[in-house]
Image: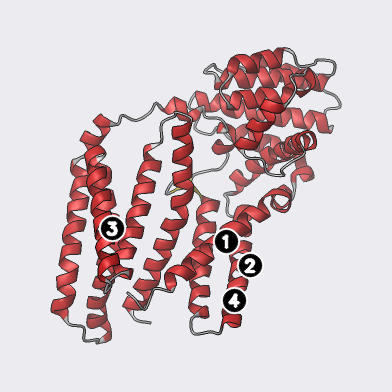
Amino acid sequence: MLPSDVTWSIIISVAAAALVLLVPLVLFAGLQLIRRRPVPVLVVRGVLVALGVFLGFLLLATNGTETPRLLTIVASAVVVVSTFLIRPRTAGAVLVAISLPWTAWWLSFLIDNALWGRHWAVSEVLAALIPALAAMFVGFYAFSAFARAEAERHPAQPAEADVRAFGATGLALLGPRIFGMPSQDLAAVLAMLAIALVTAGLTRGRTFVEGASITVAGVLVAWAACCLAFVFVRRPQDRRAWEAYTWLGEWELDRYVAIAGGPALPSRDDFRKWLKASPDVPELGWIRTELFVMEREFDKARAAAEAMPVDTEYERLEREAAFASIDWYGGGPGDTEGLRSAVAEIRPADGEERLRAEVTLAAAEVRRRLAIGDADPARPMREVRDRLGARANGILWSVLRKRLWSKYLTTATTIVLVVLALNSVLPVA
């Protein structure tokens, strides 16, 4: 396979990834704006860079079609100029993203000539390549030169606000991020893109039935790869912490679903709807307090916690856990002494209730360590995993079976179909 062929496959893969990632990034940014919360700068840049990569792909795909190509050029100019007026440094990154597919494509022809003895017209290749290289240079220069100007216009949000975002415990247990993504998510995306590319190549020149069969098989293989990444692509210490956290979370989620009636994997909107419709009774305080915290309605959360029953040791534990959570998310230290005392009262020491209590305490300890900047906030959750023993074995597979399989199947289907659609324009380029 020639360098130009390999380059085109890579360009398709990157463009597909950009298009797939663009949707959730835009949805997240929109939700932040609706909630009147700041959109993280990395999300803003991610949206614009992903859009830039896709526009760069369209510049190639529309080569030879006058009107679509003109529209793509105009759209690219509008995106770069409008971004420059607000975020000049980010505009540089967008310009590089737009130029990258075009630059890589034409550069691959020079490599064809040098290494494979092809005889492309060098003057024509350079005529297309030099403007792209110039645009990349300008983009890199803007990204470097306007860093201070953009920082002054858009100062970074305090780190404390991000640390105390709802769901901080789970985020702290995901482990290190690569390009802003947890390792298992990045591995899943890369695997699904690779499988989608192979699928697209195998479908070319096939009959409809053959192509449809290959596509279905590609979707299923990509889905399996995504599921395997969720279970296995984690550092051992991160996996152990996540198993303990998930063991408790699954019990709590089953408890919620039994009350609310579903769905198996509730969204924040599902939780909000249930919270508005749920009766204000002490027996539901364990979930209502958490949902009020999610909505940052701390006064209502405290009132619900105050009314929680304390007839049993575990009910007292849940009440103490609610107060610790409210205090921490509300900006306090999240002191765990009261929660620790409540855990010690639960007997027997190796019973299910005691173990759930210990995981609850570990989650509170993770949050407390986050607030003080501990280098290893996940340590309490790893330690309590040892107490769970075989109880938490296979819990990630259980989550896949009960809650995530359909979500991952939808993701795999989307990626494969997007790559197939993009691959169909290969002859045009």
Q: Looking at numbered disc 3 in the image, what kind of residue is underneath it? A: Ile
Q: x and y percent of residue 417 in the render?
A: 52, 66
Q: Is residue 361 visible?
A: no
The residue beneath circle 2 is 220
Q: x and y percent of residue 396 in the render?
A: 69, 49
Please state which of the two labelled residues, at mark 3 or mark 4, is closer to the viewer.
4
Please state which of the two labelled residues, at mark 4 or mark 1, is closer to the viewer.
4
Q: Earlier in the sequence, mark 4 or mark 1?
A: 4
Q: Disc 4 versus disc 2: distance between alpha carbons?
A: 12 Å
Mark 3 and mark 1 in contact? Answer it, CB < 8 Å.
Answer: no
Q: Earlier in the sequence, mark 3 or mark 1?
A: 3
Kindly indicate the quadrant of the structure image that contains residue 250: top right
Q: Disc 3 versus disc 4: distance between alpha carbons?
A: 33 Å
Q: Secondary structure at mark 2?
A: helix
Other residues around mark 2 within 10 Å, as few (<14) / some (14–19) / many (≥20): some
The residue beneath circle 3 is 98
Q: Secondary structure at mark 3?
A: helix
Looking at the picture, the colour scheme in use is secondary structure
Q: Looking at numbered disc 4 in the image, what kind of residue is underneath it? A: Ala
Q: Looking at numbered disc 2 in the image, what kind of residue is underneath it? A: Leu
Q: Disc 3 versus disc 1: distance between alpha carbons?
A: 26 Å
345 vs 227, nearest the viewer: 227
In the rendering, which numbered label is found on residue 412?
1
Q: Looking at numbered disc 1 in the image, what kind of residue is underneath it? A: Ala
Q: Disc 1 versus disc 2: distance between alpha carbons?
A: 8 Å
Q: x and y percent of residue 321 in the render?
A: 69, 21
